[in-house]
Image (spheres, rainbow, N blue to C red):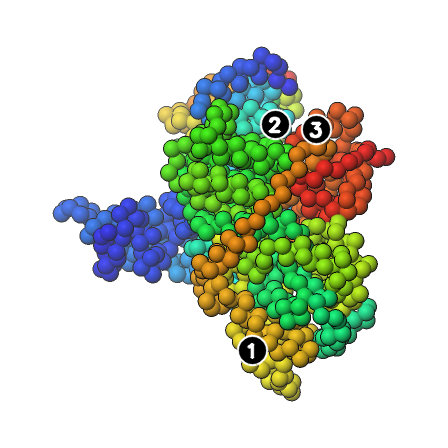
C-alpha cells in the first residue's frame, strides 16, 4: 500500500503532464522501487493514479524489460542477448548463468541473492558480451568473469 | 485532383490521398495487411510496397509503402518492378515463418486475408524449417475464439479495439517476435463492439465463437443483403445460412449507415432464430395444428366478431409490411390499430421522428465538431454510441446529460446526471441559456465545449426522454444550430410512426378497457410480458374473448394466445425497416429459406398468385413459416376481404414511392411523410409530474437488451446481474448491503429483487431493467415504494 506522502508525490508528478497517462512509466518505476516488482496490487494502484486500465499498464510492463512483474532476487543480472552480444557469445553466457545460479532464467536463486535475465540491447556493444548487475555495466564477460560477478561475496548470497 | 501512374496506368487522385487509397478507388487492390479502409494507414507490415520511380535524373528507384506515400502529380510507381515484388515476397515469407499450417482446421479458411495475400504475392513454398513460436490462447468470453499462434502482428485488433471502439481491455503485450494480443487475464471482452475483431483480423486469431458451434465453410453459406432488426440504426448486414439454419451475421458496408462495423447485439442477436424454444408450430386453443388450420380458425373467429370489436397491436420490431397489413385488416374491420402498447412511448416516437428531418448519419456524427447526448445511447442504439466515439477519438468534445448509468460517461468532457423528472427542466434551462434568455454560469459551463464548434450534433434517446423531453431537446438543438437525431426503440419505430395517428395507442387501450373491443390481434409484441405499459395490458387479459398472436419468438403473450401463428425470422423473409433517420431499407430473404414451390410433387398454391412487391411468400406446409404480411393478408382473404392486401401494399410504401430494393441504398421518407409525422406530433403533452419525493425509476439497460436479442443465449450470458440498483450512499444510509433483497411495489405488481450498489444511479433513484419495469408496470421517472426484504 502506498502511504499518503507517496500518493501525494505521485499525484503531483502526474499533475505535471497534460494527460495523466503520461505519468505511467514514472509511476510504475516508483512502485517497482517500493515493492521490488509490480504485483497486481501495484498495477491497481497505478491504474487508479494514471487512468490506464490494467491491460494498458500490462502492455507497458510487458514491453519494457526493466519493469518486472515477478519477484526477483536481491540483485538482478541482465545479460544482453541482442545481436552484437549474441555474436560475441551471449547464448553460452546465459547457459552458464543458469548453471551457476542453479535455477532457470528469471527465477531468484535458492538463497534469494540473484536473478538472471536475458535483456534487450543494453547499448554496451563495445563491451560485448555485456551485462548489467543492478545498475552497473560489466563486460566483456566470459565464464570466469560471470562466475565472479554472481559469486556470493558479490551478491550477498550463501 | 491529379493523376499518377501505377505500372503505366493513369490513376486519378485527390489532394493528399495515399497511393493505396487512390488505387483502391480505381479498382486496384494493392496487397496489404495492416492497412484497413476504416483503420487507415500504419506502414507496419510493408506488404503494400511499390517501387517509386525517381523524379530526378540520376536518382535511384526506391521501394515505398503505398499506404504512406502521398500521390503526386505525374508520380510513377510500380507494383510489378522486380524490387517491389521481392520486398513483398520477403514480407510474406517472414509472417509465414511462424504461421501454423492449420488452414484445414481454421475457421478463417476461405475468407482469410493472409491466405489470399500469400497466394497472390507468393512465395508458394516455405524455406524455413525451424521451430515455430507458439502461444497459450486465452478465454475471451462466449463470443470470440482466440488462436494466437496464427497472429501476423498487423495490430489491426488493438487499433480497432482501443483507438476506434475506445475499449481498454484488449492490448498488445511484449515485444519483438513475441507480441501477444489479448487481455491481461482470461475473461470476456467488455466492449459492445468486440465482435468486429472477427472481421478486422486478417487471419484466424479472432474468430466467431458462436458460428464455430454450428460451423460451415463460408463458400457453403447462402447469403442475402439484410438489415439488422435489433435497433433503430438499421445497419446493413450479410447473414449466412446453410441447410435451413442461420449460421452467422457479418457486416455489409453501406456508406450511409454502418460503414465497416456492427455491434455485438447485431452480430450475435440473430441466435433467436435457432434457439430450442423458437415457436415453429401453429396452435389453436392449446392444440398444435397445421398452419392452414390456424389461418382458417383465425379467419373464422374474426368473422364472428361484431363490427368494431377487434383491436390490433402491431410492433416497433415488426417490418413495414406486417404492420401495414395489420392496420389494413383493422381498417376494413372498423377496429383500432396501434404499434405501441404504451401511449407515452407512442408520443415520444412520433415527436422524435418528426424532429428527425435532418438526422445525421453515423459518418456525420463521427465527423461532428462537438456532440451533445441526452440518454444512454449504448443500451438503446449501440452503433450511435460507436459513431459518437469516432468524434471523441479525434478529440471532439462530448457533453452528456443522463439519468441512469451510461458507458459514454467515461468519454464525456462535460456531463450532468439528474433524476428522470429533473431532465426536462435541465434541457429547457440549457436551451434558455443557449438562447441567452437565462444567465446561468453553471449551465453555461456545461455548454462551453459546444461554443465555437461549427458542426454540432445533438442525439437523444426517445424512450427515456419521453415526448416533452424530445421536444425540448429539439428546441435545444435549434438554439445550438445542431443536427438532431434520436435513438428510437427497436428496428422500425420510425416506420410505425408513419402508420400511426396520434392517440392510437390510448384508443386501443380504452376500447379494450371499456369492453368495446374484446378481440385482440397481437403482431410481434409482448404486451402481457415485457412490453412497455405492461401494467394496463396485463389487467386486460381477463376481459378479452379472443387473443390472436403472430410472432417469431416465444413470449409471455404468445403463451397465452387462443390462436398462435409462428412467423419467419427476419433473415427468412423480405421486408422493409425505416431507421432512426427515416431511411427505408429493404432486406432480402436468404434463398435457403425459400420453399421450392412448383418443384417436385408439391402443387403450386393459388394462395400465392399475384403477390405484389413483397415477392413470393413461403408455402404453408410443415417446416415453412409465413411472414407477417402474408399471414395477415391470408386471414383477410379467408374472411373474404381481398382488399386487405392491396391496401396494405399502398400503406406500407406510401411515403417512399416504391419499396426499397434490398442491397441498394435506402429511400428517405418524403416530405409528405414528415408532414404526417409533424401532424402526429402536434399535440400538447401532459408535462411530467413534479418529483413527489418518492423513489424514481431509472432505466438501466445494456448493449444486448432488445426483445429479439434476449433470445440469443451466448449474448445474454453477458447480461448484467438482474436486480435493483441504488447509489452506494443510499444503500449505506439504509443500513443495507449487497446481500440484501428489496421488495418493490408498483402499479403493475410487486417484485422482489437483489440489491446492487451502483454509483451510476443518481441518489434517490431505483435502477431497474426493462423487464423489471414491465413487471412493476413502471416507466422511467415513475415513483415506487420499496422495503428491505429478508
Figure check: A82 above or below A25: below
Label 3: chain letter = B
- Asked if marks 3 and 2 fall on the same chain, the answer is no
Chain for mark 2?
Answer: A
Q: Residue B594 appears in which quarter of the rendering?
A: bottom right
Residue B515 vs residue A83, the one in the foreground: B515
Where in the figure is residue B444, as x and y percent of width and height? 47, 27
Name the secondary structure under disc 1.
loop
Q: Name the foreground residue: A44 vs B500.
A: B500
Q: Pinpoint residue B611: horizontal percent, then vertical percent.
A: 56, 78
Label for residue B455? none
| Residue depicted at x 45% and y 64% | B664
Residue B251 visible in this rendered orientation of the protein? no
Vertical side of A117 occupied by B84: above or below:
below
Q: What x and y, as percent, mark residue A71? A: 62, 25
User: Residue under circle 3?
Assistant: B728
- Residue at figure coordinates x 46%, y 67% from the top left: B657
C-alpha gap between disc 1 and disc 3: 59 Å
Mark 2 on the same chain as mark 1: no
The mark lying in front, picked from 2 and 1, is 1
Q: Marks 3 and 2, how far apart in space?
A: 21 Å
In this orientation, which residue lies closer to the viewer: B528 or B366?
A: B528
Any mark on residue B611, and which?
Answer: 1
Q: Where is residue B302 drawn, in percent x and y?
A: 73, 72
**Label number found at residue A44:** 2
User: Of circles 3 and 2, which is in front?
Assistant: 3
Q: CA distance from mark 2 to mark 1?
A: 64 Å
Circle 1 marks a residue in which chain?
B
Amino acid at each position: 500500500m502506498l502511504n499518503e506522502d507517496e500518493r501525494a508525490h505521485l499525484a503531483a508528478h502526474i499533475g505535471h503532464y497534460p494527460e495523466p497517462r503520461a505519468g505511467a512509466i514514472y509511476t510504475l518505476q516508483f512502485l517497482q522501487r517500493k515493492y521490488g516488482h509490480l504485483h497486481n496490487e501495484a498495477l491497481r494502484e497505478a491504474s487508479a493514479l494514471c487512468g490506464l486500465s490494467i491491460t494498458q499498464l500490462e502492455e507497458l510492463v510487458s514491453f519494457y524489460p526493466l519493469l518486472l512483474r515477478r519477484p526477483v532476487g536481491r540483485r538482478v543480472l541482465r545479460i544482453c542477448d541482442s545481436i552484437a552480444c549474441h555474436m560475441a557469445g551471449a547464448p553460452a553466457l546465459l547457459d552458464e548463468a543458469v548453471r551457476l545460479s542453479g535455477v532457470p532464467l528469471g527465477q531468484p536463486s535458492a538463497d534469494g541473492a540473484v536473478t538472471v535475465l536475458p535483456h534487450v540491447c543494453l547499448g554496451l556493444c563495445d563491451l560485448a558480451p555485456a551485462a548489467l548487475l543492478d545498475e552497473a555495466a560489466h563486460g566483456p564477460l566470459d565464464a570466469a568473469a560471470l562466475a565472479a560477478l554472481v559469486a556470493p561475496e558479490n551478491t550477498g548470497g550463501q | 485532383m491529379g493523376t499518377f501512374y501505377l505500372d503505366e496506368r493513369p490513376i486519378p487522385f485527390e489532394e493528399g490521398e495515399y497511393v493505396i487509397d487512390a488505387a483502391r478507388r480505381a479498382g486496384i487492390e494493392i496487397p496489404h495487411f495492416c492497412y484497413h479502409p476504416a483503420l487507415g494507414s500504419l506502414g507496419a507490415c510493408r506488404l503494400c510496397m511499390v517501387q517509386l520511380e525517381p523524379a530526378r535524373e540520376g536518382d535511384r528507384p526506391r521501394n515505398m509503402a503505398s499506404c504512406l506515400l502521398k500521390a503526386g502529380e505525374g508520380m510513377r510507381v510500380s507494383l510489378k518492378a522486380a524490387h517491389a515484388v521481392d520486398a513483398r515476397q520477403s514480407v510474406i515469407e517472414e509472417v509465414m515463418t511462424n504461421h501454423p499450417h492449420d488452414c484445414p482446421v481454421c475457421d478463417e479458411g476461405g475468407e482469410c486475408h493472409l491466405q489470399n495475400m500469400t497466394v497472390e504475392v507468393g512465395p508458394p513454398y516455405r524455406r524455413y524449417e525451424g521451430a515455430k513460436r507458439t502461444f497459450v490462447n486465452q478465454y475471451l468470453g462466449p463470443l470470440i475464439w482466440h488462436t494466437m499462434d496464427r497472429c501476423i502482428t498487423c495490430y489491426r485488433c488493438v487499433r480497432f479495439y482501443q483507438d476506434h471502439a475506445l475499449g481498454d481491455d484488449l492490448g498488445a503485450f511484449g515485444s519483438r517476435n513475441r507480441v501477444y494480443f489479448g487481455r491481461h487475464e482470461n475473461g470476456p471482452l467488455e466492449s459492445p463492439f468486440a465482435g468486429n475483431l472477427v472481421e478486422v483480423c486478417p487471419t484466424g486469431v479472432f474468430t466467431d465463437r458462436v458460428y464455430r458451434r454450428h460451423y460451415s465453410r463460408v463458400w457453403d453459406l447462402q447469403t442475402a443483403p439484410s438489415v439488422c432488426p435489433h435497433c433503430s440504426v438499421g445497419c446493413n448486414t450479410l447473414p449466412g445460412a446453410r441447410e435451413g439454419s442461420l449460421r452467422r451475421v457479418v457486416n455489409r458496408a453501406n456508406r450511409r449507415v454502418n460503414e465497416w462495423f456492427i455491434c455485438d447485439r447485431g452480430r450475435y442477436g440473430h441466435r433467436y432464430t435457432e434457439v430450442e424454444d423458437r415457436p415453429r408450430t401453429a396452435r389453436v386453443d392449446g392444440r398444435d395444428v397445421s398452419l392452414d388450420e390456424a389461418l382458417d380458425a383465425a379467419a373464422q373467429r374474426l368473422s364472428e366478431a361484431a363490427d368494431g370489436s377487434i383491436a390490433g397491436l402491431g410492433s416497433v420490431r415488426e417490418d413495414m409490411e406486417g404492420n401495414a397489413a395489420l392496420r389494413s385488416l383493422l381498417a376494413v374491420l372498423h377496429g383500432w390499430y396501434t404499434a405501441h402498447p404504451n401511449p407515452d412511448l407512442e408520443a415520444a416516437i412520433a415527436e422524435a421522428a418528426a424532429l428527425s428531418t435532418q438526422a445525421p448519419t453515423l459518418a456525420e456524427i463521427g465527423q461532428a465538431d462537438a456532440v451533445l447526448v441526452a440518454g444512454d445511447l449504448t443500451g438503446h442504439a449501440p452503433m450511435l454510441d460507436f459513431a459518437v466515439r469516432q468524434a471523441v477519438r479525434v478529440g471532439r468534445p462530448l457533453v452528456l446529460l443522463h439519468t441512469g448509468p451510461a458507458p459514454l460517461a467515461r468519454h464525456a468532457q462535460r456531463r450532468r446526471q439528474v433524476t428522470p423528472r429533473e431532465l426536462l427542466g435541465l434541457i429547457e434551462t440549457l436551451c434558455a441559456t443557449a438562447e441567452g434568455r437565462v444567465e446561468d454560469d453553471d449551465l453555461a459551463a456545461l455548454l462551453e465545449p459546444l461554443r465555437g464548434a461549427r458542426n454540432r450534433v445533438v442525439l437523444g434517446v426517445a424512450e427515456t426522454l419521453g415526448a416533452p423531453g424530445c421536444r425540448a431537446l429539439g428546441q435545444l438543438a435549434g438554439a445550438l444550430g445542431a443536427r438532431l437525431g434520436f435513438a428510437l426503440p427497436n428496428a422500425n419505430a420510425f416506420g410505425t410512426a408513419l402508420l400511426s395517428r396520434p392517440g392510437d395507442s390510448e384508443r386501443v387501450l380504452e376500447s379494450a378497457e371499456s369492453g368495446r373491443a374484446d378481440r385482440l390481434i397481437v403482431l410481434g409484441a409482448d404486451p402481457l410480458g415485457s412490453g412497455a405499459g405492461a401494467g394496463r395490458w396485463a389487467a386486460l387479459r381477463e376481459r378479452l374473448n379472443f387473443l390472436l398472436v403472430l410472432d417469431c419468438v416465444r413470449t409471455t403473450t404468445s403463451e397465452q394466445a387462443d390462436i398462435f401463428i409462428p412467423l419467419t425470422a427476419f433473415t427468412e423473409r423480405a421486408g422493409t425497416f425505416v431507421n432512426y433517420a427515416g431511411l427505408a431499407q429493404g432486406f432480402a430473404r436468404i434463398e435457403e429459406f425459400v420453399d421450392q414451390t412448383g418443384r417436385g410433387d408439391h402443387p403450386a398454391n393459388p394462395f400465392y398468385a399475384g403477390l405484389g412487391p413483397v415477392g413470393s411468400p413461403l408455402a404453408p406446409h410443415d417446416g415453412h413459416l409465413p411472414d407477417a404480411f402474408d399471414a395477415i393478408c391470408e386471414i383477410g382473404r379467408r374472411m373474404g376481404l381481398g382488399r386487405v392486401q392491396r391496401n396494405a401494399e399502398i400503406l406500407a410504401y406510401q411515403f417512399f414511392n416504391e419499396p426499397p430494393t434490398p442491397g441498394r441504398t435506402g429511400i428517405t421518407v418524403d416530405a409528405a411523410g414528415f408532414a404526417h409525422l409533424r401532424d402526429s406530433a402536434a399535440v400538447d403533452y401532459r408535462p411530467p409530474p413534479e418529483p413527489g419525493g418518492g423513489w424514481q425509476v431509472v432505466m438501466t439497460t445494456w448493449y444486448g437488451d432488445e426483445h429479439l436479442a434476449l433470445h440469443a443465449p451466448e449474448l445474454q450470458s453477458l447480461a448484467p446481474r438482474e436486480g435493483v440498483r441504488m447509489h452506494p450512499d443510499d444503500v449505506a444510509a439504509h443500513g443495507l448491503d449487497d446481500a440484501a433483497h428489496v421488495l418493490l411495489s408498483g402499479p403493475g405488481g410487486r417484485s422482489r429483487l437483489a440489491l446492487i450498489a451502483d454509483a451510476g444511479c443518481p441518489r434517490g433513484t431505483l435502477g431497474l431493467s426493462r423487464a423489471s419495469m414491465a413487471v412493476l408496470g413502471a416507466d422511467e421517472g415513475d415513483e415506487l415504494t420499496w422495503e428491505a426484504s429478508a
